[in-house]
Structures are given as structure tokens and as C-alpha cells.
Amino acid sequence: MNGDFTPSGWDVLDASHRALREAVAAVPQGGWDLPTPCDGWSVTKVFQHAVGDQIGFAAALTGEPGPSFNPFDPSGVLEGDPRAFLEDALSRSAKAWAGVDREAAEVPTPVPPNKMSPWSGSTACALDAAVHAWDIAMATGGPSPLTPEMARPLLTVAREIVEPLRAWGAYAAALEPQEGDDDVAALLRYLGRDPHWTAS
């Protein structure tokens, strides 16, 4: 499966970055400590993880420094303007992907198998942004940023990369599919998330 690059990356990556940006912009005052669908993680921790992963993908592609913290062990303490932190990470990610040769056989990635096709790598990067945008939106009472059009390619790449990561605790066990699930619900259940999760 392939796609076309735009100056800021693949369409699905652009959409996922936009979703994360909008979810973060909608976090209300006092909302950073709210619980999320990521068990035990606040909005702040999910945000820090998402930002760190975008920096990690950019670093894998460019050789530039990666995140200054462990995205899998976020502090939960915000320093500075979170929106500026996010913009820097998304800018690095988009710029790195825009510089990738779409005809390359493979590109380096920070997740196993650490080398993927350009389409799979960029979509894996998008998966992280989109799903954490959903986590934040659900925690803060916003609408789901995921659409069936986004979910379909994200589920394709999730099936490529998630199983090894479950062993490291990066993803919860998949939930059983339910009758009537749409593409979004299928993606979320595969990633161990209840599509109907609420903070209450």
C-alpha cells in the first residue's frame, strides 16, 4: 500500500498530527491531570509520551537527537508551554518525513523491526499521534478525532508492529471484537482500548 508525499508528509500523518494538535488545544484549564484510557496515565503523561514518540521518529530518520526523556516513563509534570512543546515535535516529525524518498525500500524507525517501508513507517508514526489524540479527547470530554478513513490504514500498520510491543507493555492486550464495530472501534479494540471509554 502506498501514498503520496505532500510538503508536510503523508495524508494520514497530516491528519493524525492535526488530530493531536486539536486535542491538545482543547485541554481545559485543570484538565492535564485527568485520567485517560491509558490505565494509570494522566492527560499529561499521554501528552508527553505522544510528543516523545514524534521526536523519536524524527530522530530515527534524521540522526538528530531524540527525546530528552523516556516516552515510556513520562514524568507527568509539565514544564513550559505544552502547545509550544507539541509544535516543535510535530514540526520535527513532519519535516523529517517530508525529506524521505517515497521510493526507498525501507527507512529507519524507533519501533521494531526498526526498518520499515516509507508507507508503513509514516503510518506507524501517524498511529501514535492519532490514538493518543483520541486518548486525550476522551479524557477531556471532546469528540473522537478518529474517522473510518484514518482508522483503516492505521489498523493495517498496527497489525504489523503491535504484537512485539505488547511484550514490552507498550500496548495492552487486544479486546475481543464486537458485533457492529466500525473501523474506528476495530482499531481501538486491537490496541486494547474500549471504544466506549469515558472518564466517569
Image: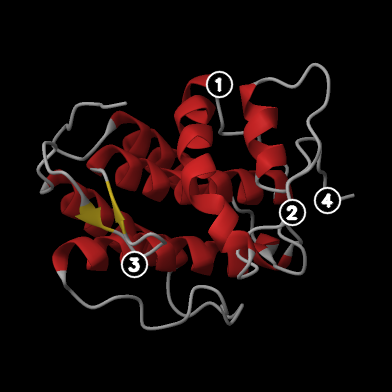
Tell me which amino acid carries mark 4: Ala
Three-letter amino acid code at disc 2?
A: Ala
Instruction: Tell me how the rendering is colored.
Output: secondary structure
* Residue identifier under label 4: 199
At label 2, counting other C-alpha atoms closer than 10 Å, the crowd grade (few under 14, some 14-19, many 20 or more) is some
Q: Quadrant of the N terminus?
A: top left
The Cα atoms of the two marked residues, 1 and 2, are separated by 22 Å
Pointer 2 residue: 173
Residue in the picture at 17% in, 32% down: 5
Q: CA distance from mark 4 to mark 3?
A: 29 Å
Query: Reading the chain from its start, which is encountered first: label 1 or label 3?
Result: 3
Res 7 quadrant in image:
top left
Q: Residue at x 64, y 49 (%)?
A: 135
- For residue 56, the mark is 3
Nearer mark to the viewer, of 3 and 2: 2
Q: Nearer the viewer, mark 4 or mark 3?
A: 3
| Callout 4–callout 2 Cβ contact below 8 Å | no
To which residue does mark 1 refer?
148
**What amino acid type is highlighted by mark number 1?**
Pro
- 11 versus 32 height, above or below: above
**Residue 24 visible somewhere in the drawing:** no
Dot 1 crowding, Cα within 10 Å, few <14, some 14–19, many 20+ = some
Q: Nearer the viewer, mark 4 or mark 2?
A: 2
Front position in the image: 173 or 24: 173
Between the C-alphas of marks 1 and 3, the distance is 27 Å
The answer to whether 158 is drawn above or below residue 44 in the figure is: above
Q: Is residue 132 visible?
A: yes
